[in-house]
Amino acid sequence: MRLFSLCASLLLCLLIGACQSTSPGSKQRSEKSLGISSSVAKQRASRVSQVSYQLHLDLTQARRFKGEAQIQFQLADTLQALSLDLEQALISQLVINGQKLYPNYDGHTLVIPASLLQGGANLIEVDFSSPYSHEDQGLIEYIDPKDGLRYLYSHFLPSSAQTLAPQFDQPDLRASYRLSVLAPSDWQVTSAAKVLSHQPVDESRQTVGENHQPAGENNLWQFMQSEPVSPHNFSLLAGPYHTWLSEAEGIALQLFARQSQAESIDAETWLSQTQQALNYYQQRLGSKYPFGHYTQAIVPHLPSEFRASQAQTSFDERSLPQGTPRREVLRALAEQWLGNLVTLKWWDQLWLNQSLAYLVADDAEAQLFGQTRAEEQQSFIRSPEQVEQQIANSLELFSQDPLPSQNKAIAQLNQLKFMLGDTSFYQGIGNYLERFALQNADLNDFISSLEQVTKQPLSQWSQAAFKRAGVNRLEAEFSCSGDRISRFDLKQHNGDLGSSQRVKLGLFTLGRHGLHKNLVSEVDYQGASTEVKRLKGVRCPDLVFSNYQNKAYVRVKLDKASLETALLHLGSLEEADLRRMLWQSLWESVLAGELPLPRFIGSTLVNLPAETDPQVLISTQDQLKQAKALLEQMSPNQQRYSRQALNAIAQMSLRLTISNKADPTLQSLWFDNYLHFAVSHQAKRHLAALLEERESLPGITLTPERRWQIITHLNRYDYLGSERLLLKEKQKDSSPEGQTAALGALVARPRAKEKRQWFERIQAHSKESDPQLLEKLTQVMRHLYPSEQKALSQASAEQRLAELAEVDKRNSQAFMQSYTANLLPRSCNYASLLRLQALLDRPEGYSPTTLRGINRTIAAEQECIRVQEAMQPNP
């Protein structure tokens, strides 16, 4: 009887709620949809303001957590329904302005009917439960395999704050958060605001049951109200973390790490460097640290090296270098000002926050620790893509490699700093931080802040630098009379000829012991040609580099005399940074079809043996590896030269491996290069002998990673007995890394039947497939069609192109990133290029990720054709 009454009461409540509700939510989509469209975000921002969240979270149970949310906001109108973002939750109660409602919820969006909204103040109350995440987004739960302890940490970029609680999950709807958390008593809890109190739960108020631990075993953590924060910059960290404490000028500093990792952390150095950086930034930026505390946490896995949320940064322990990650600490702290104090309006501006923070951090490293700017920013292929790109949905934020556009943005900001001067540039940043503190801003706001300080018009320059595609090409053109310059001009191509740029010109003279710096001169140039009158009468140089110290984002084309000097004498330059930049300029000339590839390779054979700087060696060896892939794609054209060139590089690498045994770093780099170029039968036989310990190289240790590299290489090039070596190593190394490497080596074997089977599994994959299968297929795609296996690749080329649109519809952006990077067929000829270009004419269209992949493959094919044509003898 009691059960009947309970059921009847429940049914009555549901019927009453349904009368006040819109129709029940639609069927949940099979794929998680954490994306927010720019159109929805813009429309909501025009109606909603003064948002605040009061959240209570119960974290005492594994797998799922419970939450109670009160959302207060001002609404401009009640003309239409309003949506809240909430991902994959179970809603137990929904109250809108005092009225209970059956939720119109599809697993992603909670729709609030216009009839229950009111102009002005509104209050929405939601009781819910949600699963923890075990991926790279959301509130992530991690069980430490070493001791079984459970840890939680958040990653809400770009739009997964909705997995924590119902929110308006878009960056321009900042809100204050008042948080309380129920957690086990041995846990630490931290968030965007300072802790107000934490104490055992009152036993008289706590119920013991399936949802709670026994009374006294939990603490209630209460936090102060946070400063207004964008949802993606809110944070939560909870678990039995080991904690180190410090202080800098009244700011509480904390460092968190898992108990099993604590002994390996040099916390004293970490916190000391944080204190130094915090003091430096406050002085340099002219702005006090904006939050009352700063927590740093070392966590198991993130999709990037670190994630700087408001008042808290998480560092991916897999990406941390040995010792203290000084550069990452500096960059993450800089983002507290340039990403959290001032926040982007929409995702097409993320580059500005991060690039400004990285530039400021590089300056800090130079000032505090005597380091120059990060090596990876000094030498890279200059991307023709514009920095600022339209992002229609937050899911598109990571649909492309962010590194090229980020490097371009940092370089352009560095040029701006060089033009304005350090003092004015930093005063402009200070003005920007003051004007838009705890607000959202964009590029126009930043540029206007600089203009206010410098009184210089910068809008046209910024449009060209950040919003237009292409790379300026800069070339010095000069003539000499006797041994003196009679005329010197800077020629500019392919860029915005109306905006001014500033560079340093480096003039070098060839002497008995190599190239020596003769003169450095700063020059402003504008238009197609700029005459540099001050150089008239200066000693005629043997080499001119028109972007000395890399102050401008330009591609330097060497004049004829400088080119010949560089090809023969580049290794004799004293400055390592300049050597790296010259190698980069030579390589860019190869890819532009201006310098024949054999001349570049010949120059490396002449100059690289004397190279002693590891960074120069790393970047130039990477260019040689790209050259190898190009030569293999050209096959059968240039086959004879390819064989000779690759053998020459392999022999040079082996010789330098042996001769550099006194320098382990250089020896290791040369051995790894040898491994990559060992394609002759003799070289492959030597690698097999090293693997089986029939031969050895003094100073070289075959780590498990190196052993798998050798095995993969031997299988890829079908060395006799390589499959036996693979199976033997697989039995020896049962680690997850070893099994993954074994899969790559197996797939790389040039066997048509096995490749076809793997190819069919790739083509059949969909979003609904096992996530572990995606990881496996990503490894397969990387190794399925190496550059030298063109014939095997062409067997399925037409099918890949014909089914691309359908594969795109069925799969995630992560899958399509790997697919377009590895499986779009290339043959280094015009027929292949036309076949790729025809993809863009198809009416069905592609996702942004796939479209970018197609365009990049087309650009790479055009590049290969240019390189190949430059190798042809002139008629």
Image (tube, rainbow, N blue to C red):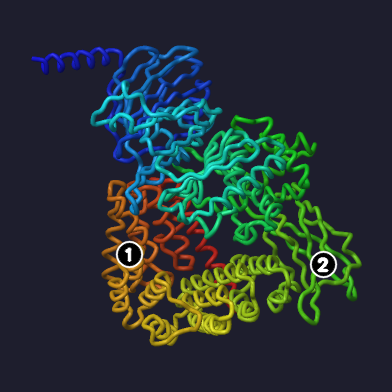
Is 822 placed above or below 397 here? below
Is 726 placed above or below 775 here? below
For residue 308, say whether it is visible: no
In the image: residue 165, left or right of residue 311: left
Single out the mark in the foreground, 2 or 1. 1
Query: In the rendered structure, which disc, 2 or 1, sits on the residue that comes first in sequence?
Result: 2
Residue 332 in percent (x, y) is at: 57, 46
Amino acid type at mark 1: Ser
Q: Which mark is residue 478?
A: 2
Local crowd size for mark 2, using a 10 Å CA cut-off: few (<14), some (14–19), many (≥20): some
Q: Nearer the viewer, residue 287 or 452?
A: 287
Amino acid type at mark 2: Phe
Residue 776 in percent (x, y) is at: 32, 58
Which quarter of the rendered picture does the C terminus lie within? bottom right
- Label 2's element? strand
- Label 1's element? loop
Residue 868 in percent (x, y) is at: 54, 72
What's the CA distance linking mark 2 and mark 1? Answer: 61 Å
According to the image, label 1 marks what residue? Answer: 735
Is 86 placed above or below 364 here? above
In the image: residue 820, left or right of residue 667: left
- Quarter location, residue 384: bottom right
Which quarter of the rendered picture does the N terminus lie within? top left
The reply to whether the C-beta atoms of the residues labelled 2 and 1 are less than 8 Å apart is no
